[in-house]
Amino acid sequence: MTTSIIQPPFRRATINDVGTLAQFVEFASEGLAVYLWTKIAGGGADPWHIGRERVASETGGLSYRNAVMAELDGQPVSGLISYPLGDKTEHISDCFPAVLVPLHELMNLALDTWYIHVVAVSPEYRGKGRGLALLALAERLAGSAGKASVSLIVSDTNTGARRLYECWGYREIAQRKMIKEQWQHPGVNWVLLGKHL
């Protein structure tokens, strides 16, 4: 990430932020993250430990290295995880968790874009323009990486977030039916949204 683009109240995330980032991932995933982390952890283990491990990774989409935090009075209040997608379709293995298959199918339709994996604001700080500030930052990061488009995925029942994205210029590209297993969620479809810069 280009440091000159990331100015206060934003800062690059560090390894010390993994606990907060795991919470932001959970907010943005609408419960899917903890569902998956619980399955991975197995009986009796702490799913949040798995989440923190995932975010602490040096590689992969959810790595803290792809994250930016926004602070207020020295405390992180919102976060963004975003990164460039490649220009080639990624194979989805038969061993891949079924609940993630439709999400990766949609990501394969957003090739060569700057992908916004997580936009999250702590509940007590919502409704103050922090989400829009993160989207604007993602667009600046995309531009600095030479990407002409940004993309993200939202559930069809997250109408507040979708309204925010569409007001900011995002348009629907495609939908895929959710696979839920035992994950409890009111939605039916995942929706891929995109915006040309």
Image (tube, rainbow, N blue to C red):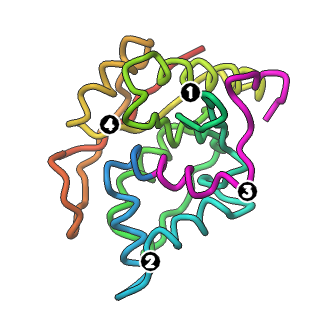
Q: Residues within 10 Å of mark 3 (few under 14, many from 20)?
A: some
* Mark closest to the chain's N terminus, 1 or 4: 1
Quadrant (top left/top right/bottom left/bottom right) for the N terminus: top right
Any mark on residue 80, and which? none
Q: Which circle, 4 or 2, is nearer the viewer?
A: 2
Secondary structure category for the residue under label 1: strand
Residue type for callout 2: Asp
Any mark on residue 15, and which? 3
What range of the chain is rendered magenta?
1-25
Residue 94 sits above or below residue 164 on the image: below
* Mark closest to the chain's N terminus, 4 or 3: 3
**How much space separates mark 1 and mark 4, taking CA atoms?**
14 Å
Residue type for callout 3: Ile
Any mark on residue 150, and which? 1
Residue type for callout 4: Val
In-image side of 123 versus 157 (left or right): right
Quadrant (top left/top right/bottom left/bottom right) for the C terminus: top right
Q: Residues within 10 Å of mark 4 (few under 14, many from 20)?
A: many
In the image, what residue occupies the spot 35% across and 25% down? 172
